[in-house]
Image (spheres, rainbow, N blue to C red):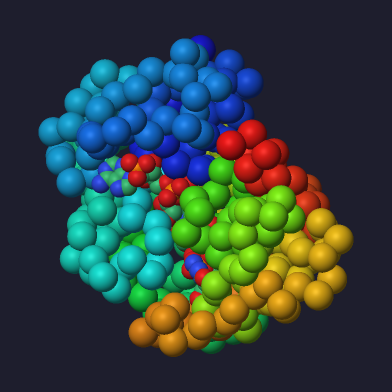
């Protein structure tokens, strides 16, 4: 039985990855940081099948201990301060978690068991103000937020430990991926949740920021399979994971409203650009996943329309039962 350790087990991606690994017969361990209230919503349905280990990205000994306790064959580093907007309010902490946290884990692997295969959750935010379209593995990074900068560090330290110490370390450069388990502060879930509540007569408007930015949005459940595939290869490498299609925030909102039969959607959306302004914006992302398709045999399975419908339907069910 293979063993896997996932950092940030309470997060969106970790919940899907844990399901996938359990289905494949893995023994799954996950780390949680200490919080004053338990935050296990996303993994409630599998809680009895996984083993939780307390550990924080800031605390080296807790990371060492997580590895000593779980003895993993594969380690997936999904923990991070992952909200781009917050990274301007907490730039140093974002660097500590999202950048230096990666080095702490790699150091733990290097000193405890360098045979552990490592996955780093890199991001399309590293491309930021894009220098090439579509973005691929060799596209120059131009991050636009403390989060993006921290992810660039995490990416290069992963490459560096692979080249310096021969650790099997992969970096998955994942474009935005969403699901009904997405945090409510991200724009897609904010929209699907707001649309559900408007449909049920519980609210009238959603306040958003700029509706123009475009993202390459995929389904998180499809993307965790790519993470696993990367660690099953003979050689460690880096891959872009995306759908190859992008849409604006406006298109997402329009489709979400149409899903519930509301066509005059603009009546329900307030675009308050100044109060949601980011000091620097990422306007346009679209990924080229041809390397992942060729080497990993991976491709996205869920269309944009299906994703939007899935999220709105799930939020209607959630809000109906409240
Ligand atoms: P989430 O925000 O849903 O989950 C992040 C996880 O990290 C949570 O479990 C959180 O714990 C944990 N965490 C935060 N800070 C610490 C810390 N100091 N020590 C230990 N754990 C911590 O993110 P996603 O699931 O969406 O993303 C997973 C990873 O992939 C992240 O690294 C993200 O940056 C990256 N990524 C995500 C993309 C996306 O579109 N979803 C795209 C590209 C990259 P808690 O619940 O306690 O807050
Ligand atoms: P992003 O996701 O920054 O791409 O990072 P987010 O959903 O926060 O923003 C996407 C775009 O929508 C615009 N926007 C709004 N965003 C939010 N959150 N709330 C609003 O009301 C709103 N109105 C417009 C934003 O300005 C932006 O242009 C996500 C995270 O999961 C990262 O961790 C991950 O690395 C990247 O995706 C790839």
Residue 246 visible in the snapshot = no
Instruction: Place residue 224 in its image quadrant.
Output: top right
Q: Could you tell me how many numbered marks the image carries? A: 0
Residue at 51% x, 61% y is 186
Task: Please tell me whether residue 117 is drawn above or below residue 131 in the rendered image.
Answer: above
Task: Please tell me whether residue 266 is drawn above or below residue 231 in the rendered image.
Answer: below
Residue 15 visible in the snapshot = yes
Task: Please tell me whether residue 235 is drawn above or below residue 155 in the rendered image.
Answer: above
Residue at 33% x, 66% y is 86
Residue at 61% x, 29% y is 20
Q: Position of residue 217 (x, y in %)?
A: 66, 62
Residue at 52% x, 43% y is 13
Furthest-front residue in view? 201
Q: Quadrant of the C terminus?
A: top right
Q: Position of residue 41 (x, y in %)?
A: 47, 32
Q: Position of residue 268 (x, y in %)?
A: 68, 72
């Amino acid at each position: 039985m293979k063993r896997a350790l996932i950092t940030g087990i309470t997060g969106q991606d970790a919940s899907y990855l844990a399901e996938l690994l359990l289905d494949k017969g893995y023994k799954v361990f996950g780390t949680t940081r200490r919080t004053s209230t338990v935050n296990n919503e996303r993994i409630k349905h599998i809680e009895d099948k996984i083993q939780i280990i307390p550990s924080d990205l800031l605390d080296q000994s807790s990371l060492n201990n997580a590895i000593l306790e779980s003895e993993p064959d594969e380690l997936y580093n999904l923990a991070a301060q992952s909200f781009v907007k917050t990274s301007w309010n907490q730039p140093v902490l974002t660097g500590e978690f999202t950048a230096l946290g990666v080095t702490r884990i790699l150091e733990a692997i290097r000193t405890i068991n360098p045979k552990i295969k490592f996955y780093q959750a890199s991001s399309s935010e590293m491309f930021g103000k894009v220098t090439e379209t579509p973005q691929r593995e060799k596209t120059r990074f131009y991050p636009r937020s403390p989060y993006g900068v921290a992810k660039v560090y995490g990416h290069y330290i992963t490459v560096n430990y692979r080249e310096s110490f021969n650790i099997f370390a992969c970096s998955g450069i994942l474009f935005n991926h969403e699901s009904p388990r997405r945090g409510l502060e991200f724009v897609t879930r904010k929209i699907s949740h707001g649309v559900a509540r408007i449909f049920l007569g519980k609210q009238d408007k959603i306040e958003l920021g700029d509706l123009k930015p475009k993202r390459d949005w995929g389904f998180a459940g499809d993307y965790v399979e790519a993470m696993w595939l990367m660690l099953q290869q003979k050689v460690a490498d880096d891959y872009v994971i995306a759908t190859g299609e992008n849409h604006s925030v406006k298109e997402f909102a329009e489709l979400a409203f149409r899903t519930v039969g509301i066509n005059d959607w603009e009546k329900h959306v307030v675009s308050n650009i100044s109060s949601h302004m980011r000091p620097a914006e990422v306007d346009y992302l679209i990924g080229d996943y041809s390397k992942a398709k060729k080497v990993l045999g991976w491709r996205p399975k869920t269309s944009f329309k299906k994703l939007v419908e899935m999220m709105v339907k799930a939020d209607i069910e959630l809000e109906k039962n409240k």
